Amino acid sequence: MTSTYDSDDTGSEQTGLQTAYTVSAVADYLKAALESDPRLADLTVVGEVSGYRNPSSGHHYFALRDEQSVLRCVMFRSGRGGQFIADGTQVICHGRISIYTARGDLQFYVDQVEPDGVGALQKAYEEMRKRLEAEGLFEQDRKRALPELPDRIAVITSPTGAVIQDILNVLSRRYPLAELILIPTSVQGEKAAPEIVQAFQALNAMDDVDVAIVARGGGSLEDLWAFNEEIVARAIFASNVPVISAVGHETDTTIADYVADRRAPTPSAAAEIVAPDVRDLGGYVAGFASRIDEIIGRTVRDSRSQFELAIDRMNMRVPDTAEPRQRIDDLLTRARLAGQHLVESSKQRLATVEASLNALGPAKILDRGYTITRLADGTAATSAGQFATGDKLGVTFGDGSVETTVDEVDQSSNIVDS
């Protein structure tokens, strides 16, 4: 079967079957129909916020949901109550229903938002948080300290996201000494929670891991919900090593954050928390070496001062031997001089005695005119009675001797004292 058609200005084309409209014509018609309905032009809707985005333009993009349906919403920055929009919050929104013709999306254009209690997801989150807290999973006393210089760091996250690259970049710059071990897992969707639990089981099977980071980027409450699951909380609680939770952005808080030993506001911040900066370590080592040098120098100076003080105290207690030694030297000198004087004096006296003895000697007496008379046997005669007439005798003078004969013996003394 063949047919012909004609085009007109209404955005429709006449075919053999019926009029065909362009997509734009249909979108414009629906937009006009929706905006002409007074009930849809002044509408108030209650629902739970999810998928909230607030880009740099300042506009608010989110969805309102209940247990059965989802309504896409936008509130421009001129709207009121933007501070109440957050994933999981229950809000009352006023605005109008229309079509965003560029995409053909049915949207609720909100101009005012008011809070209206807690949404279903947020309510489930609060109930689980309170229950696990009552069991003691959040106790500060059980939280473990992070190792100061980890050798091996495990990261539980998606292998394809930006999170692992951020952590790698930070660690390679700050602390390249550590080895990073990636344990891949889904971080969003129905399979995420069981896979995260399996990742922690794999972590516990390793013997040489020092610390672990569980991380993912930001998202809505629904995107992060795997980290609010009870099985994930208990897996973190049962970890053999300390765990840092780095889930979402700084404003996001999950059950995993409460159970973990440490919470980081972002994955990059977790990389900064898990290990020190090698530049800081270098400064610390240099400062420590300087302090050691200072301590050693001070110790040496103190020891030297104490030693010198001890010497001074000993000198004060020991008698002064310098003066007695000098006195001994003086006495020895005087004794030596006195000895020399005594020797000289003795020599002089000896010379005098010797001279006196020499003056009294026989030779000196003979020199004065005296003689020595000897008997015939050579002995000195001491008496004239020792001689008889005719005896031979010898007479010794100072300059010689003579031999003669006794002619006469006269025993009377003719010597007169002079």
Image: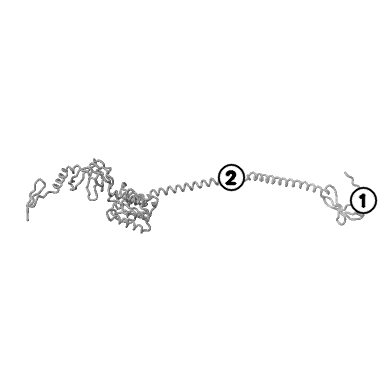
Q: Position of residue 404 (x, y in %)?
A: 88, 54
Furthest-bottom residue in view?
205
Residue 274 seen from this side = no
Residue closer to the observer: 113 or 335: 113
Question: Of label 2 and label 1, which has the lower sequence position?
Answer: 2
- Is 43 placed left or right of 3 in the picture? right
Residue 411 got which mark? 1
Instruction: Locate the N terminus and report the quarter of the image it occupies.
Output: bottom left
- Is 17 placed left or right of 96 in the picture? left
Check disc 2 and report its element: helix, strand or loop.
Answer: helix
The quarter holding residue 158 reads: bottom left
Q: Position of residue 366 (x, y in %)?
A: 83, 49
Instruction: Give the residue at mark 2.
Output: 313
- Is 258 placed left or right of 405 in the picture? left
Q: Which amino acid lies under the numbered mark 1 shown in the image of this protein?
A: Gln
Instruction: Locate the C terminus and report the quarter of the image it occupies.
Output: top right
Q: Which of marks 2 and 1 is in front?
A: 2
Residue closer to the observer: 162 or 207: 207
Check disc 1 and report its element: helix, strand or loop.
Answer: loop
Residue closer to the observer: 320 or 201: 201
Density class for disc 2 (Cα within 10 Å; few <14, some 14-19, many ≥20) is: few
Residue at point 88% right, 52% down?
382
Residue closer to the observer: 358 or 198: 198
